[in-house]
Image: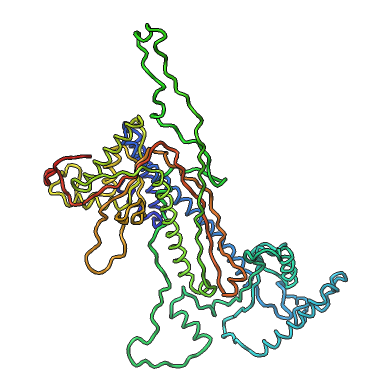
Amino acid sequence: MDRIAELLARLQDLSPEELVELQGLIDTEFDRLAAEDENAETIGELGKVVEAAETAAAEVSRRAEVAEETARAAEELRSRMKLLRTPVEETQTPTEDGEEAVPVDEEGKDPEAKTPPAAAAGQEGLDKAAAGAGRVARMAAQQGRPKAVPGRTAHFGTVLTAGPGLRNVSPGAPVEDRMTLAEGMAEQLSRMNRQAASNGDVMVASAAWTYPEGRRLTRSNSAEANASILEGVVSYGAITASGGTCSPVNVDYSVPTWAGADRPIRDGLAAFSSDRGGIMFVPPPDISALAGATAVWTEATDASPGTATKPVLTINCGTVTTVYVDAIPTRLQFGNMQGRFAPEQIAANTDLAIAAAARIAELNLLAKIDSSCTKVTAAAYLGATRDLLAAIDLSAAAYRYRHRIPRSVSLTAIFPDWTHDMLRADVARELAHSTSGGEPLALSDSDIEAFFTARGIKLIFSLDGRAANALGGSTNPLQGWGTQSAGAILGWPAELDWNLFVDGTFQFLDGGRLDLGVVRDATLDSTNDYETFVETFEGVAFRGIEALVIRSTLTPNGATAGTVAVTGYAE
């Protein structure tokens, strides 16, 4: 599993060969575990292998989608380039067999061609506009700018492509004439409700001024390449250096981010689609509610007719509970110029916004889970590892006993992800270790998790911690760390909050995702801005009999019963 964990840690950066290796290792590990005797530890390990297989399969699907999108974008670019490479024809161009082509006039028209009578009247205004455009073109040609460098042909021009709002022309296809654009614009305006509030624009067509390779200054070019392009068109004269670094330094446009958008709480719960915005259900009864339905009927009781009756318990209809999903919206506003000229900043802020939204959504789920939990505490006696494992043993045993739950049924616990690190630090501070199970100062995350899976506990590790006093009170610390200032390093939280419940107690309700992409309206246009908008709908339903949120006071000092005096254990 160590190699599998190593490959999963850098899943998106794996080469195709490493991804194949990962899938092979997962298959081998699953077959090995499936052949062993079934027990709580084996089932826990099998669960990890299956989760790893699902993660690898999702990455394979993601790469396939990226490859498909890349191929589609490349095909579109090839089509656009094909249009740009169409040469500018002379007034008379030889044909392939050497014969002279049909003569054309100075505006590119065949003087011999006849205009169909039915189209002549409708084309009158367009012909006048085209004639005016021809005069402008001739004036621009007489100016002689920009002048092409000998040996290099420059094709300048505006490429107009259809948008989704232009009917009868496929999106992305070139718009051949202005009449098509004008008719499409008028038709789109007639379909829009003038009385309704502005709800964003509809793109009819987009225009872009095209430049040949010899006139394009790009980020992908080196500074020397861009300078060479400039020198090929405009001469700046000689520049004399007087020492030092006279040339411009390199520019790094990348904006790195490290925050992730993982949702371990959501992914660890049983999930169900909720396309009606919620769920109605009857909570399940507990075994304690059936007390009085069963008794022992002895021979002596049966021999005394009329003095005893068999027990009966009347079951009433359960109360219907309704749970609704919440909306988790995320909006970002950018300037048009920022979006056009600083795409790296747009991408970085979008990535961080998705990660921040994941934190808000995860803490919302955790708060809903806590609201259905009974709040209890566990005192400190020894080091963090021994105290936490002892609290797990006691809580799980009592939970199973109260509800008569066999050991084959898993219990689920939610811990903050830093629990790994606190227990590892606690073990590192112990006075002595048993080395029969490996190097205690090099415990991996899977070694730490084995402490819990051996106890039949399914683990969910949250990347986000509850805010201070989230469970009530006025002295409960943040389940994490704030900003580190100069001075002593921030210590471990003195208390650790964690949840325990039978697997399936909480169900994730997935209401879907509303992704509107880019939003623009008259208000945003007036400030030269646009927005991106995404919204998810989700909730959690308590479908169990009991859930606990336990506050453990922990100190990762490596203390054991042989190194500290303990007067007694209340828990």
Residue 122 place in picture, x, y as percent:
83, 72
The structure residue drawn at horizontal position 28% and vertical position 41%, both measured from the top left corner, is: 392
Q: How many numbered marks does the figure carry?
A: 0
Above-or-below relation of 545 to 496: above
- 314 vs 3, left or right, is right
* Nearer-the-camera pick, 83 or 284: 284
The structure residue drawn at horizontal position 32% and vertical position 56%, both measured from the top left corner, is: 478
- Going by the picture, which residue comes out furthest to the right? 117
The structure residue drawn at horizontal position 41% and vertical position 26%, both measured from the top left corner, is: 290
Residue 250 place in picture, x, y as percent:
39, 78
The structure residue drawn at horizontal position 55% and vertical position 57%, both measured from the top left corner, is: 515
Above-or-below relation of 15 to 209: above
Give the color scheme: rainbow, by chain, secondary structure or one colour.
rainbow
| Residue 414 visible within the image | yes
Quarter of the image with the C terminus in it: top left
Residue 443 place in picture, x, y as percent:
23, 49
Above-or-below relation of 151 to 569: below
Quadrant housing residue 570: top left
* Nearer-the-camera pick, 525 or 323: 323
Residue 277 place in picture, x, y as percent:
55, 47
* Nearer-the-camera pick, 427 or 551: 551
- 234 vs 374, left or right, is right
- Going by the picture, which residue comes out furthest to the top? 303
- Going by the picture, which residue comes out furthest to the front? 307
Quadrant housing residue 407: top left
Quarter of the image with the N terminus in it: top left
| Residue 56 visible within the image | no
